[in-house]
Amino acid sequence: MELIVSLIKSKLGITTNVRDTYIAAIASGIKTELEDEKGLVINLTNSYHQMFIVDYTAWRYENKDSDAIPRHLQFRLHNLVIHTGGGTE
């Protein structure tokens, strides 16, 4: 998860460690959501899984008050569900 937090910080342009705990909590929550609600098996060594969590976490971090997930993330989530054969959608 350290690599994911580092990638998220790079994407967002964050250079300090002040927000690490918050960012890690969002990323961990997204991983749990994908596993528990979507039935996915997330492999943190899989670069596709890593980058989805990075992009989704960065979006959540920047859009705290928005419930509408962007289309590009919807499509990628749909592809993840299809590719891994899981999900309850």
Image: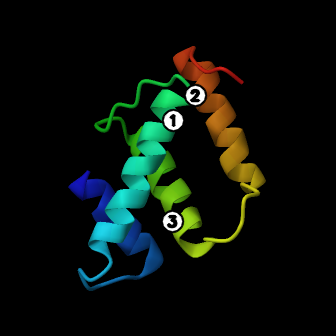
Q: Is residue 34 above or below residue 57?
A: above
Q: Which residue is mark 2?
A: 38
**Quarter of image, res 23:** bottom left
Q: CA distance from mark 3 to mark 2?
A: 20 Å
Q: Which residue is mark 1?
A: 34
Q: Position of residue 78 (x, y in %)?
A: 68, 32
Q: Position of residue 65 (x, y in %)?
A: 68, 71
Image depth: mark 1 or mark 3 in front: 1
Q: Residue at x 58, y 65 (%)?
A: 59
Residue type marked 3: Ala
Q: As rendered, which of 27 and 50 lies closer to the eye?
A: 27
Q: Is residue 50 left or right of residue 45?
A: right
Label 3 residue SS: helix
Label 2 residue SS: loop
- Contact (CB < 8 A) between labels 2 and 1? yes
Q: Residue at x 46, y 30 (%)?
A: 35
Q: Residue at x 45, y 56 (%)?
A: 54
**Quarter of image, res 60:** bottom right
Image depth: mark 3 or mark 2 in front: 2
Q: Which residue is mark 3?
A: 58
Residue type marked 1: Leu
Q: Position of residue 45 (x, y in %)?
A: 28, 37
Mark 2 or mark 3, which is nearer the start of the sequence? 2
Residue type marked 2: Lys
Q: As rendered, which of 56 and 36 lies closer to the eye?
A: 36
